[in-house]
Image (cartoon, helix red, strand yellow):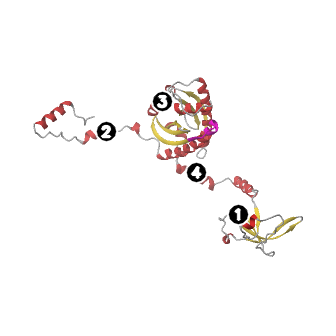
Amino acid sequence: MSDILTQAEIDELLNALSAGLEPETPPETSNETSIKPYDFKTANRFPKEQIRTMSIAFQSYSQLMSNRLTAILRTSVECELLSVEEMSFNEYNNSLPSPVILLIFRVQPMYGSLILEVSPECAYMIINRLLGGSAISSDSSKQFTDIELALMERVLRQLLEIFAEAWSKIMQLEAEMERIETSTQFAQIVPLNEPVAAVTLNVKIGEESGLVSICIPHNAIEPIAKQLNTRMWYSTSMGNMTSADPEKVEKLRQRIKQTSVSMLAHFKNTPATVLDIVNLQVGDVIRLDHRVDEPVTVKVQHIPKFFAKIGTSGSQYAVKIVDIIKEENEDESFAG
């Protein structure tokens, strides 16, 4: 505000211009006036690696939420991750509308509580669909009734079930519901100046859309802070692969040995026109471009593996393997 002229300075400037005088330039300010005290409370407490890992987890959560809401509401629902950003709990709390549906829940092994917030627009879209109406939201400023809260509680329990599933590729979590609030005054889970990660999701049902947000306090992720590092996550997964349990490896080997695959014996390709195929009748004979003494090709799945001769075994037709096809002689990527 120091750059705004006062009324007295404006009058003096006008008088100087009318008299044809050069206006006096104000003295240059020293560098001391541009120095601002640093507030350590505003420092970023969430490293970029943690924000990136949470973005990966909640990207998966948005897809799972889309599938779960589609099944519950019997209509197409699209969920999209908009942002994962750091702010103070006071800023997050002040950004919430009123009334609002707030799910307070705990996640093991995290500390304290987390918040899942459903905006009034999104809540009424879901309630209207559950009651057989359209997704068009009604007046979002009115308070929720007990019936509407009961319906939303069932939906929120479903959304809480997929929370641990979304994080399963990073770590094992267990979410537990505490309570539901409709006022921000009763949802202060941490001090107002505590930094939090605010995850914002957009939920679209038909032409209507609403927001869902998740508040994760910084102190809540302290027990899992190291696991939120993508480099640590990658190195841990690679370590698990290299130092696998021998017993598990043996079980995997036995399962692979018992896995069924298809084996087909193929004659040489015989070309024919569409007209010839259309005119085929019962009793017609197809002449094959395959000599009687020439071996057939045995393919495992789509990959040629053996040469074999045709014969019988008991009352069934059979093939006898006479040679093995070397892998370097065949392109196994070709699906024949």
The relative height of residue 150 versus residue 43 in the rendered view (above or below) is: above
The relative height of residue 322 versus residue 223 in the rendered view (above or below) is: below
Left or right? Give the position of 157 relative to 35.
Answer: right
Query: Is 212 colored magenta in this rendering?
Result: no
Label 4: which secondary element = helix
Mark 4: give few (<14), some (14-19) or many (20+) Cα within 10 Å: few
The relative height of residue 314 versus residue 48 in the rendered view (above or below) is: below
The mark closer to the camera, 2 or 1, is 1
Q: Using the image as rendered, state which of residue 252 and residue 295 is in the foreground.
A: 295
Q: Which residues are magenta?
A: 69-78
Q: Which quarter of the figure is the N terminus placed in?
A: top left
Which residue is identified by label 2?
36
* Sequence-wise first label, 3 or 2: 2
The relative height of residue 236 versus residue 267 in the rendered view (above or below) is: above
Whole-angstrom CA distance, mark 1 to mark 3, is: 59 Å
Whole-angstrom CA distance, mark 2 to mark 1, is: 71 Å
Mark 2: give few (<14), some (14-19) or many (20+) Cα within 10 Å: few
Q: Residue at x 81, y 64 (%)?
A: 281
* Sequence-wise first label, 1 or 3: 3
Residue 229 point in image, percent of width and height: 52, 47
Whole-angstrom CA distance, mark 3 to mark 2, is: 33 Å
Which residue is identified by label 4?
236
Mark 3: give few (<14), some (14-19) or many (20+) Cα within 10 Å: some
Q: Is residue 14 visible?
A: yes
Q: Which circle marks residue 302 in the picture? A: 1
* Sequence-wise first label, 3 or 4: 3
Label 3: which secondary element = loop
Which three-letter amino acid code belongs to the residue tagged 1? His
Which three-letter amino acid code belongs to the residue tagged 3? Pro
Which three-letter amino acid code belongs to the residue tagged 4? Thr
Which residue is identified by label 3?
97
* Sequence-wise first label, 2 or 1: 2
